[in-house]
Image: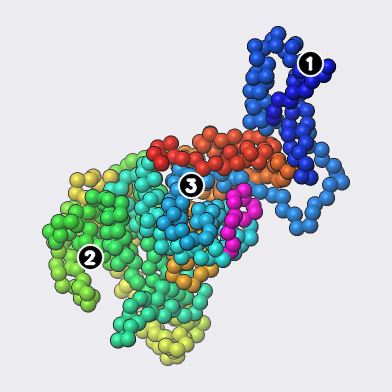
Amino acid sequence: MYIKKSYNKGRLYLSICHGYRENGKTKSKTIQKLGYYDELVKDYDDPIAHFKNIAKEMTEAATLPNIELSPNLLLDNNSSLRKNLGYCAAKCIYGHLGLNHFFQKQQNKNKKIGYNLNQIFSLLLFNRILDPSSKKKAYESKDLLFERTNYSLDDIYRSLDLFSDMSLELQKHLNEKVKEIVGRDDSLCYYDVTNYYFEIPYNDEDMVDEDGNVTKSGYRKKGMSKEHRRTPIVQMGLLMDSKGLPTAYNTFPGNESEKTSLIPTVRRIKNDFEIERIIIVADRGLNSSDNIALMAGKNMNPKHNDGYVYGQSVLGADKEFKEWVLQREDYIREIEKDDYGNEIIFTHKSRKKAKTVQLKNSDGNRTQKIDTCQRQMVYYSEKYAKKQRKEREQVLQKARDLIANPSRYNKSTSYGATGYIRNIRFVKDTGEIPDGLDLSLKTDRIEEESKYDGYYSIVTSEMELSDKEIRDIYRGLWKIEESFKVMKSEFCTRPIHHRLEERINAHFLVCFVSLLIMRILELKLGYKYSISRIRESLKNYGCSHLDGNHYLFDYRDDIIVDIEKVFDLNLQKKIMSKSEIKKVLTYQKSPYSTT
């Protein structure tokens, strides 16, 4: 809006007008007639200055010209008038995390890069949050956003190698920024591993030198799949803080043990994030002698002053531990309330125990003995006992049917039941069960397992913390398990449409940052909504093009209202100009940032 000055018989006349372009020509439309200057000056000291401010306010409020819509208007062929603006919330956090500055610095280091790294990464990120798809489909749907797209599909594929190279540096950058904008306790980290399958029948080949030594292991390898698949997998280890925010991640070949992935990851983040001491919380799958000794073996190495809280398999424990578990007279009964005020009954006991563990050498043999001290906690739950009995009975029904009808099963379909069957074996080439086997249930194993129904255990190096504090810490593991579910379901981390290690890692990087941004958004919204609900709301908050400069919005819910408050945005207007939309999408620096 602007003040138009015109003269009528020597008198100055003022109007507020709206300027616009139509068919390449500049036009204007009178919005408000103000009157003659010599009359206005009686009411205003400086009418022109006063109404300039009014015009400015009207512009900011996007007072629109009359938009004439005819029922006879037709769509052009291949029209796509819909746009999304819900990603503005993710972009606010993107700016708070300084991701645009990070990629600009990376771009400045390599002047030969002929495309904008920030534009590409933000497209892949917002696509992963709103409508996860392949890189090709993300590129094809780029016009759904208001972002600049000065790059080609080939540029996207080329950039993936660069994103992989800067993954560790980006994780370090994000950790520093998370500390600034929401705070983070580095002294406690949760760790877990999941795997992602690839629909290919073969492993990636190892690279070998002239002497036949493996110089680089293949990446997609067959291993212990948590979904019991027999196709190659890649494993991902994820670290998370006590608020449920992702801290760091690592990937490794599918045929490697998840237990060996913990220590290298901990050493890296301690060095990169400058952490003096860290307590790792993990489930029983990560509980090994090496991980105990290397996390808390002070007498082996003074630097190993870290700690752990691990789940402990009762069935997999030594004889003395099992006997202690079954000594019922030592248990105590406690009642406490959960976050919802419901009573929880705990039957438990604990003890401090000297423990000797043995480290493996490079040949895999256990040689070096390490003495440690461990707090051992065991719990009994009748509800958990019933659950275990029910699950075992389901497997036993399958085992009994297999014994009665072995021809109906093979190595793949008999998964889970074979551990309870005596004399079971399979034909190597076909996986079938040969005829003539004397199959029977392992009743001794069933009887032994049933003794420990309802018992579960936690072990820790932390002697100064109470049983309740350890228990509360260990409960936090559900957050990392849920994070894996979010990545696989909400962000569709799989299927992975890449075969090269660098590009697979870049894919994981985009998913990791997407998870971090959505977790921060979840936190900023006060944990009132699930990530699934937030994503649905962001996806729905969109608009349709009206004329050359204006868009019509048709969605608003409680989540959008809360996003307005948190990020100080105006998302209530039914019609917005492109300049208003650009203002919404302006990168927001963190209020704590000094950059």
Q: Is residue 392 left or right of residue 73?
A: left
Q: Alpha-carbon distance for marks 1 and 2? A: 95 Å
Of callouts 2 and 3, which one flags the residue occurring earlier in the amino acid sequence?
Answer: 3
- Point out the frontmost of discs 1 and 3: 1
- Residue underneath mark 2: 289
Would you say residue 149 sits in the magenta stretch? yes
Mark 1 element type: strand
Residue 312: x and y, percent? Answer: 28, 60
Q: Residues within 10 Å of mark 2 (few under 14, many from 20)?
A: some
Q: Name the amino acid type tagged 3.
A: Tyr
Q: Is residue 159 left or right of residue 471?
A: right
Residue farthest along the right direction in this orientation: 72
Residue farthest along the top direction in this orientation: 42
Quarter of the figure that contains the N terminus: top right
Q: Alpha-carbon distance for marks 2 and 3? A: 41 Å
Residue 191: x and y, percent? Answer: 34, 57
Q: Residue at x 44, y 46 (%)?
A: 98
> Is residue 389 among the parts visible in the rendering?
no
Would you say residue 502 sits in the magenta stretch? no
Q: Looking at this view, is 226 or 129 the one in front?
A: 129
Mark 3 element type: helix
Mark number displayed over residue 94? 3
Of callouts 1 and 2, which one flags the residue occurring earlier in the amino acid sequence?
Answer: 1
Q: Looking at this view, is 115 or 85 the one in front?
A: 115
Please identify the quarter of the rendering in which residue 249 is found.
bottom left
Residue 477: x and y, percent? Answer: 37, 53
Mark number displayed over residue 11? 1
Q: Which residues are magenta?
A: 142-153
Q: Looking at this view, is 407 or 40 the one in front?
A: 40
Q: Residue at x 37, y 58 (%)?
A: 168
Mark number displayed over residue 380? none
Of callouts 1 and 3, which one flags the residue occurring earlier in the amino acid sequence?
Answer: 1
